[in-house]
Amino acid sequence: MSYFHSVTLDREKCKGCTNCIKRCPTEAIRVREGKAHILEERCIDCGECIRICPNQAKVAVTDRLEQRAEFRHNVVLVAPSFLGQFGRDVDPDRILEGFAPLGFDGVEEVALGAEHVAAAIRRHCRQFPAPRPLLSSACPAVVRLTQVRFPSLVDQIIPLHTPMDAAAVLARRAAHDRTGLSDDQIGVWFITPCPAKMTAIRQPVGLARSEITGAFSMTDIYGAILPVLPRSGVQAGHRRASALGIGWGIAGGENEAIGDGALLAVDGIHNVIAVLEEVVRDRLRDIDYLELQACVGGCVGGPLAPENPFLAKRNLHALTRRLARTSPESGEHRVSADVLEGRLTMREAVAPRPILQLDEDPAIAILKAEQLERVVQQLPGLDCGSCGSPHCRSLAEDIVRGVAFETDCVFKLREQVHSLAKEMLELAQKLPPSMGHGQAGKGEGGTR
Amino acid sequence: MVPPEQARLVLEFEVTGRDFAAAGNAATRIKRALEHVGFSARAVRRAAITAYEAEMNIVIHARRGTMSAYITPETVEIAAVDEGPGIPDIELAMREGFSTAPDYVREMGFGAGMGLPNMRKCADSLTVDSEVGKGTSVRAVIRNC
């Protein structure tokens, strides 16, 4: 299977340092020949490497605004995290209206999709008492993390659309009703705070095909919309989402919108890993639902969001205080027809994609696992990363898989050079029999 | 080289009583080894729970112990052998909710009396031997299916 990844390397800028390999939550990066290489089957597009790279050599591939020309009608999906990029003095109506001068024909709020999804989650938790805890499907990086690092938990991912996908369903239908155009004439675009959502659009999990056409980087759109923001929100009626929907942009907001049951919210990919380890151990049986977000602070902390996540969080808090708690069409206890009729339900199961198996044949894999333990013992255990693998243990894994050598370890190499030098010195001190003393010529007659 | 049909991976870890900082490390390593060998996700999960509960039992109740895993392509046997107070009534200890863990351990969220019952649910076979005042040995076998 081939993978699309939004996260890619700018070879020119990469200096081959070890910052990204050490930070990657799935050990998906190796440095080879002075450049970082991303292992396609392991990368989950979380964007941790984009954040950590000191040379800006890791980039997120997104779509270009010109691609809209292929469609007769273009709708933009605006997530709460985007609204959080603007100070408290910028009314969200102005932001939503700012998309008209940018050339969009319609706007839909992702927060509205989130309200439908929250109702669907509540309903699902009540309908299905097991398994527990159910895991949020909202963050595509977390879903992919679960597939590759916690394959035994894929059945616990709640089989519902993300707010982004739900909003796309609403937006597409509204656009069709408004214009009478067919699906292929309507472009539905997302403004993404992260590479994971870009990947989720191109290569969705749980859906055969995304309703979303593509995504633009939040940083790019932020720069483009600032100069064309209208002075005041003139046409009312754009903004329909409520405080509970908007709150999804911040860590904890998803659970607040769900409201009932035993809920736990975790943000930051390394924190998510730690808590999923506990789920595997069955230590969270008393929790109904886990909100899990790869970015610290939630979507406002996305690597493509230009504003500082804490300031963006404050902006969103201020906004939610001004809004009605629930919206008329998706009140806290209403379940929409879209939910009831399964239009916001995943179409396909989330497949496990384990990455650790050392060989197809388990018997050979055991031999390799044994060899791995032996190699680990030989390595210095400093996890310096100079070999290009993130830890000594991952180097051992790479050696056993046949893609690295023990001498890739600078310390092992030094040891070998040292013993080689010693051997050379010993050899250099040896004299040929014609010059030397001792055994030369013994028993061969010698001189008379 | 060992012929593949005799392939067997043995892992062994020392576990120290009351060392909550390192608690779970052995179980994590056993889980990872099973993933390397290619055990099914289901079997890995059952073994991970069993190993974790066994390790926590040593940490909570015993002075010290050893966690071992014997892995073949078909099964994993997890053995937890400790030096500790032992279990006076094994049948009682197997009951859900029965626990002799001290309060401070319960306050940490452990010792809810689910350890052995949970292991029995996850393992295909479970043997517990114990001698009061000496120690306990728990052996669990999980089939790779």
Image: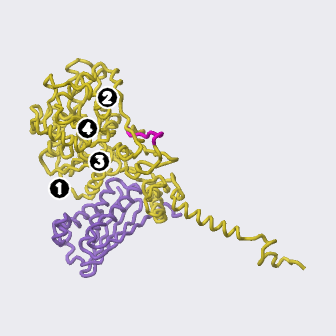
- On screen, A100 above or below B102? above
Q: Is residue A435 left or right of residue A60?
A: right
Q: Which residues are magenta?
A: A6-13
Lower sequence index among marks 4 and 1:
1
Sequence-wise first label, 1 or 2: 2
Residue wearing tag 2: A213
Amino acid type at mark 3:
Val
According to the rendering, which colour does chain B have?
A: purple
Q: Which residue is mark 1?
A: A286
Q: Disc 2 marks which amino acid? A: Thr
Marks 2 and 4: in contact by CB < 8 Å? Answer: no
What's under tag 4, amino acid-wise? Met
| Chain to which mark 2 belongs | A
> Neighbour class for label 3 at 10 Å: few (<14), some, many (≥20)?
many
Position of A169 compared to A323: left or right?
right
Q: Disc 1: which chain?
A: A
